[in-house]
Amino acid sequence: MTISLRPLADADLDDVHRWESDPDATAMAAFTREDPTDRAAFDAHYRRVRADPTNLLLVIEDDGRLVGTISSFTIDGEREVSYWIDPERWGRGIASAALRLFLDRELERPLHARTAAHNLASAAVLRRAGFVRIGTETSWAPGVGRDVVEHIHRLD
C-alpha cells in the first residue's frame, strides 16, 4: 500500500458521489446531505467547497488508484478535518495513512474532527493520529433523518 494525496479533479467526482451515496457509508458517517443520492446537491456542495480558497480538499490514492477524499475547512471559527474512504476499502489502514500525510499539509492547530458515536473505526483513526475526544453532543443528521450522538475530537 502506497498512499498519496493530490488535488481533487473533475474526473474524480463520479467516484466520490458513488461513495457518498452508499447507504452503509452514509449510515456510518451520519452527517451528510439530506439526500446523499441527489447528484445536483452533491455537485452544488462541491462547487462551494472548491470555490473557497480556505478549504483544503484532496483525494487519497492507493498505488495511484482513487480511494477517498480528505479535507479541512473552517466552521464557526474552528478548523476541522474530514475524510471519506471508498467503502470497498474500509479496514485497510487507508484513512490512518492518509490522515498522517494530511497533517503534514494542514498545519493549523487546534484541528477538530467529529465522528458519529457509533463510528468506532473513524474514532480510532483520529486517536492514532493524536486527536483527543473533548466532547459529545447530539445533533440532527440529515443523511439518516434523525438525531445522532457525535463525538468531538481535537488535535493541538
Image (cartoon, rainbow, N blue to C red):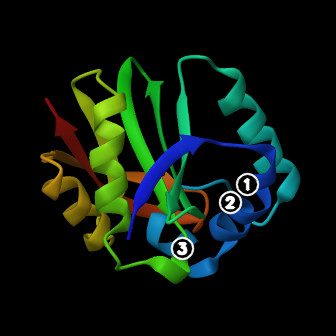
Q: Quadrant of the C terminus?
A: top left
| Residue 85 position within the rendered picture, expressed as x and y whole percent measured from the top left | 50, 65
In the foreground, 110 or 103: 103
Q: Residue at x 88, y 50 (%)?
A: 40
Can residue 35 be seen? no
Residue at point 55%, 71% (across, down): 86
Query: CB under 8 Å between callouts 1 and 2?
Result: yes
> Which of pointers 2 and 3 lies earlier in the amino acid sequence?
2
Q: What is the spatial separation of the Cα atoms under label 1 and label 2, in whole angstroms? A: 6 Å
Residue 16 has which mark? 2
Q: Is residue 88 above or below residue 123?
A: below
Q: Amino acid at mark 1?
A: Asp
* Side of 154 relative to 59 (left or right): left
Task: Tell me which numbered mark, 1 or 3, is placed earlier along the sequence.
Answer: 1
Query: CA gap, disc 1 to disc 3?
Result: 18 Å
The correct choice, above or below, for 50 with respect to 65 in the image is above
Residue 12, numbered label: 1
Image quarter where the N terminus lies is bottom left
Q: Is residue 48 left or right of residue 114?
A: right
The secondary structure type at the circle numbered 2 is helix
Q: Secondary structure at mark 3?
A: helix
> Badge 3 is on which residue?
25
